[in-house]
Every structure is written in structure tokens, then in C-alpha cells.
Amino acid sequence: MKHDILMTDLSKTADNIINHPIFSLHADIHLNLRVSTLIEEALQNREGVLTDTGAFMCDTGKFTGRSPKDKFVVYDDKTADTVAWGEINQAFETDKFDNLYKKMLDFAATKKLYARYAYACASEKHRTNILVINTLAWHNLFCNHLFLRPTEEEIENFEPEWTILNIPEFEATPAVDGTRQGNFTIIDFTKKVILIGGTAYAGEMKKGIFTVLNYVLPEEKKVLSMHCSANIGQDGDTALFFGLSGTGKTTLSADPYRKLIGDDEHGWDDDEVFNFEGGCYAKVINLSQEQEPEIFGAIRYGAILENTRFIGKSTTVDYTNQSVTENTRTAYPINYIPNVAVPSIGKAPQNIFFLTADAFGVLPPISKLSVEQAMYYFVAGYTSKLAGTEMGIKEPQATFSACFGAAFLPLAPKKYAELLGEKIKSGNVNVWLVNTGWSGGGYGVGSRMKLSFTRAMIRAALTGDFDRITFSKHEIFGLDIPQKCPNVPEEILNPRNTWSDKQAYDQKAKDLALAFEENYQRIIK
């Protein structure tokens, strides 16, 4: 057994791992390796190469993203009546899980393994200890970055609650094992084990634990789990930013005057908002130092790059290259970027922003929501897909993802919405719907909302400027629209005013309102 710990040789900890049920086998186990050693191991294993900034660049194989159709939840007494079964939460038999688990352990018996202690939830009250087992050194490095890192003293008496076993080289036999195809992610909430096989996409581990927390926190602790970013102002006020891809969630939560709590996953209990993670997993397609200097600067020694390519024969990354995938990403510890909150915790929020890139150009650039409207738009999780972003899309399409993260919700969306509503009421929280999409017409006719205007509107909401402003009611959506905003032209605040054809606006707005209602009825039934 090799001990290469960050600070000390913890043989007691190593013995604890061997006695863990997952290790009733003899294996070459590397425990809690340093970042530098993991990189050396990954290079020696030919898992990737170094870039000119020192970042470790690798490929994830044939899967360059998550495979939601191959994600399962074990159906048993615990989950039978609590999980919202369907396309997202597919049931998996307990016996099949046990058999697959054993096959993976047998497969791992002859492999070099990388074990790591980590945890999720920055709040001590909700801390969830994790044991991660990988066959790839860079996967273990990924977990070091994305999960929270226990101290030297904490490692001494670390007791894992959840286990992740990730073996990309192992593929299931669907006809025998009960999977859809060779790759799979399976969560057993009773045994507290996540099995991942047949895919090297590291995000499956991160989102596997996120799914776990989306069950445990709301169902067992009445804590709201959220797919959002969060930051904290100089006066200690917390803001949350919800939004699907392309809505500006990462960009708008990065504020030089506010400290970042986290960029993706958070919990909200009675007193505070806390980050689930210890790092960031950011898209890097078309990344530039000018547009996103914090992320660009974080891609240095220790950071990971997935599925990127070099410029020519150099070791300089070409961030415009999407020959492998458009979903090129980087993973790094949160302290690789400046202006972060330490620890990753803030007070209960005073403001919540739902971000949407409305390609139809009919939603107001900012509007204030009632509690009921907040629950409604939270359940909707709306944005729009643009023509050309996916095969077969010829014009903008409305897309909905419940609670801005449907793929990771084991419970019914209305449970999260009800919990959100309770918290908004009890905390008297301001909730805002922000359209970062189009104005003056839909995509191809109107123009994208200027980032400077959106930032000004968010700033006005955060500083209380809107408290002194008169609001008007949108005739179709019933949204409260501010009539003025510092540093924003008044004429763009009501989207109907920006359209030359008012009747065309009214019809398009009615169409979108109907799409919202049809989606809502489908979700809450």
C-alpha cells in the first residue's frame, strides 16, 4: 500500500479503507495523493499531457458529456414512494445493482486504484463525507478539485458516508445487468453507493453527488437544494442566480464588488446558503482572457482541461477548437479564482434572480415576481434553444428544465417549489425574472440585451434602487415591470415598446404564455 498524503502518513486511515466493505480485495491502492503526485501518475499512465500553463489536458473518450438516459436509481423501500419515477429517474432493481457492484469489485481487484476522502456541503450541519475510488488518476484529481477537501486532522478520523466507485474501463452487459447500454450511473440511496462505468466523463461523479443531495436535503432535512450560483455583497447580503446554459449565470454572478460563494450547486437552510462543492467545472469553448479573465487565469498547474486541442504543434490551447465537442471544460479548486468567500457560506438570500435567454424577445428585461409567480417560474426553468445549436432546430424553441435542473431532481419538482415558496415568504426575499435574451423582436430580428444593461438592472435590484420606482403590470404575463432603472433606457424596460409590430408582439407573447402553462400542467400532474 502506498501512502502519499498531503501532510502526513496516515496508516490508520489506510487500514480503515481496507476494512471498508468495498475493499474486501487485494489491490494496489493509492490514498489521498497530492495534486503533484496525481499529475505525475496521470502522465505516467498516459492519461493526458501538460499545456504551456501547466494544466493537465485529457480526453473523456466517446462520452464528452453526461448520459442522462443511462442514469438509474435503485428502487427499494426507501425510494419506492419518494422518488419521482419516470424518464429522469429510471428504476433499477436491487438484485441487479448488487450483482453489478460485485462484478465491478472483481474487475477492480487487479487494477491500480486511487482512493480519496472528500466531502460535500460547506455547512458543518449538512456535511456529507465521501469515499471516491477511481482507476484514472485524473478522475481522482477532478474529485480533489470539485468536492470539498478535508483537513489533515479531519482525515485522521474520517468516516465515509457515501462511496463512489468509478471504473470507465468496465462496461455492463445490458441483457444481463439491466442497463440500457455499456455505460451507466446508478445511485443506491439505501446502500449509499454510486456506481459509474463505461464512461470517462468526470462530470458524472459531480452530478451523481448533486443528485444525492437533491434527495437527502429536501426529503430528510427540509433544506432546499439548488442548481444555482451565489455571491455575497460587502454588507453580507446574499444573492442567488438560477439559469440554464447560455443565460449568463456564471458571468452575472462574477462581480468584482461581490465575493463568489459558488458557481453551480448550493443548499439553503433556515440560516444560510452554502456551497456543495470545493471547485468549479466551467465550459471553455471560445474562452478568452479578455472576456473571462478569472477562468482563464485559473487554468494553470493543477487545473484540468477536458477535450480541448492545441494550436498546431504547440502546447498552447486553442479554445475555439470544437473538433472533439463544444462541451470543452476545465476543473479547478475554487481558490484558483480571486474574490471568493471563505468559507463558501452566506446568510439566507435577500435577492434571487431567475435568468432566461428568451429568444422570442417577449419577456421583460427585468420584472419582480410575487411568491406564487416565483414558484411558477421556478418550476418552469425556462430558456430557449437557438436555431443551429442542435440538429433539426431551424428556429428558436422554448425549453423548460424544472427548477433549472430537472436532470438532477429525484423528487417531484413541486416539492422543491413549495420549499422555495416557504423560504421566500419567511425571509421576505425579493425574486426577479431577468431576460438576458432578445429585445425589439425575436432572434434574427431583434438584438441581444446588452450585458451592461443587465448588469445595471441587477445592480439596481441588489442596492434597493427599485424600492423607489413605480412598477407597471405586463398585460399578458402579469409581471411587475419597473418604469425606470439607473443607466438603462426607459423604452427597453417594457418589451412591447421595442417592437415595431405591436400585434406581432402580443401574439408571440400569448404563444409563449401558453407554452408555459402547458409545461406547468405537465409537470405538476
Image: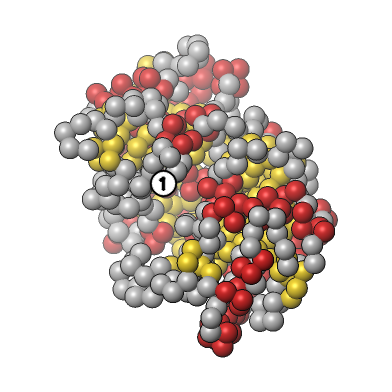
Pointer 1 residue = 283
Badge 1 crowding class, 10 Å Cα cut-off, few under 14, some 14 to 19, many 20 or more, is some
Task: Give the amino acid type for the residue marked by disc 1 in the picture.
Answer: Lys
Q: Residue at x 44, y 52 (%)?
A: 186
Residue 407, horizontal then vertical, whole percent: 49, 59
Please determine whether, in this image, residue 450 is positioned above or below residue 279: below
Residue 268 visible in this rendered orientation of the protein = no
In the image, is 43 to the left or to the right of 252? left
Which residue occupies the extreme left position in the image? 313
Q: Residue at x 80, y 67 (%)?
A: 470
Residue 35 visible in this rendered orientation of the protein = yes
Name the residue nearer the viewer: 24 or 302.
302
Name the residue nearer the viewer: 316 or 54.
316
Residue 126, horizontal then vertical, whole percent: 67, 39
Residue 228, horizontal then vertical, whole percent: 59, 51
Name the residue nearer the viewer: 78 or 524.
524
Q: Quadrant of the N terminus?
A: top left
Element assignment for label 1: strand
Q: Quadrant of residue 352?
A: bottom right
Residue 340, horizontal then vertical, whole percent: 60, 33
Name the residue nearer the viewer: 3 or 503.
503
In the image, is 515 to the left or to the right of 98? right
Please determine whether, in this image, residue 343 is positioned above or below residue 412: above
In the image, is 190 to the left or to the right of 223? left
Q: Residue at x 47, y 57 (%)?
A: 246
Tally of marks: 1
Q: Residue at x 44, y 32 (%)?
A: 298
Please determine whether, in this image, residue 86 is positioned above or below residue 332: below
Q: Quadrant of the C terminus?
A: bottom right
Q: How is the image coloured?
A: secondary structure
